[in-house]
Amino acid sequence: MKVKEKISAEESDRKLKKVLTFQDLFFLSMGGIIGSGWLLGVAVPGRQALPRYFRG
């Protein structure tokens, strides 16, 4: 049986390549726009309907 050597966190970080391409940034931003859009789109009718619901 071979014993694996422990690799320190710094050595492990050096082996990782952290890259965001244009396509990655594009889809991240589009997800943010779409995600915030549906939340804001639901908020306005919710504010309008809420007082009517409690008035009876």
Image (spheres, grey):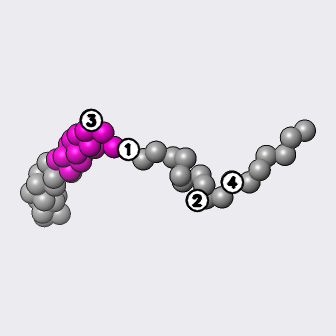
Which residues, given as a range, are shown in magenta? Answer: 19-37
Tag 4 residue = 7
Task: Give the secondary structure at mark 2.
Answer: helix
Q: CA gap, disc 1 to disc 2?
A: 18 Å
Q: How crowded is the residue under tag 4: few (<14 C-alpha within 10 Å), some, or many (20+)?
A: few
Disc sitting over residue 19 in the figure: 1
Q: Which tag is nearer the camera, tag 3 or tag 4? A: 4
x, y percent for residue 40: 16, 52
Q: Main secondary structure of the magenta part?
A: helix
Tell me the residue at 51%/46% (across/down).
Answer: 16
Whether tag 3 and tag 2 are in contact, CB under 8 A, the answer is no
Which one is in front, 25 or 35?
25
Whether tag 3 and tag 4 are in contact, CB under 8 A, the answer is no
Tag 2 residue = 10
Decide if residue 1 is on the left or right side of residue 23: right
Disc sitting over residue 23 in the figure: 3
Residue 56 visible (yes or no): no
Residue 45 visible (yes or no): yes
x, y percent for residue 30: 21, 41
Reply yes or no: does residue 40 show up in magenta: no
Mark earlier in primary sequence (1, 2): 2
Q: How crowded is the residue under tag 2: few (<14 C-alpha within 10 Å), some, or many (20+)?
A: few
